[in-house]
Image (cartoon, grey):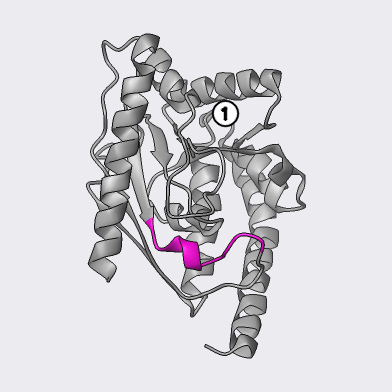
Amino acid sequence: MSRLWQTVVSIWAWLVLVVCLVLWFPVLAIVGLLTAPFDQGRYMTGRIFRKVGPAMATLNPLWRFRYSGTLPKDPRRPYVVVSNHESFADILLISHLPWEMKWLSKAELFRIPFLGWNMWLVGDIPVKRGFGPSALEAMERCRRALQYRVSVMIFPEGTRSRTSELLPFKDGAFRLAIEAGVPILPLAVSGTGTALRKHDWRFGRSDAEVRVLEPVETTGLALSDVPELKARVRQTIIEARDALAAGRS
């Protein structure tokens, strides 16, 4: 693939994303206003917003994104959803899944015009890294989303890995699931590492897949079980991710 073609396609794909975010904003504002009395969890506005990911991926000729696995039968059963994190494109890939989740995201994203405004409108949850009170507030907002029967989406690595090795998982998602009494729903992402490499604005070719794995129940677990639960889920994701990568080779 020539550098010129990659640059042209990348400019086109970023333009598509910006246009989608701008066009989605008034739609989300109107839908949010109309549905507020009966949709306190902002499920409907969230589902509309997540369509940005499939729209951009479909119009990017360098990408082929898909999902697989056993999908939840009830989209309103709340889960704490966790996934490995290879690239910014993970967000666009996972958004293909046909149910709504509130995303725990770094606070800096909420300051970006239109992107951040849309995230506020749909009830995504900001967190400031390294600031304890922000993390506590974010976890409380996650608990409220679960109470409204809306799943929450967390990358337990905290940031993207620079290599093929998963970073250590943080405790937050697993403590949240145990305290809220909801299952963990693991996702395995594979193939997005080439879609948008860290510190590069140009998109690359990507044949990526997110696989929905079997839920992990937390009923009967205590906070002392977090290390074992975290290790078990991490290993499950690693094995599924490696299987996906082997299937593409």
Residue 146 can be seen in this image: yes
Residue with the mark numbered 1: 37
- Please tell me which residue is depicted at 55% across the width and 44% down the height of the picture: 45
- Please tell me which residue is depicted at 39% across the width and 45% down the height of the picture: 99
Q: Left or right of 140: which side holds 107?
A: right
- Please tell me which residue is depicted at 45% across the width and 58% down the height of the picture: 93
Q: Is residue 81 magenta?
A: no
Residue 124, quarter of picture: top right
Residue 51 can be seen in this image: no
Q: Is residue 198 magenta?
A: yes
Q: Is residue 36 above or below residue 162?
A: above
Residue 188, position in %: x, y?
A: 34, 49
Residue at disc 1, secondary structure: loop
Q: Nearer the viewer, residue 7 or 21?
A: 7
Q: Is residue 173 above or below residue 98?
A: above
Q: Nearer the viewer, residue 108 or 167?
A: 167
Quadrant where the image shows the C terminus: bottom left
Q: Which residues are magenta?
A: 190-199
Residue 119, position in %: x, y?
A: 64, 44
| Mark 1 Cα-neighbour bin, 10 Å: few <14, some 14–19, many ≥20 | few
Residue 90, position in %: x, y?
A: 48, 54
Amino acid carrying label 1: it is Pro
Q: Is residue 117 above or below residue 232?
A: below
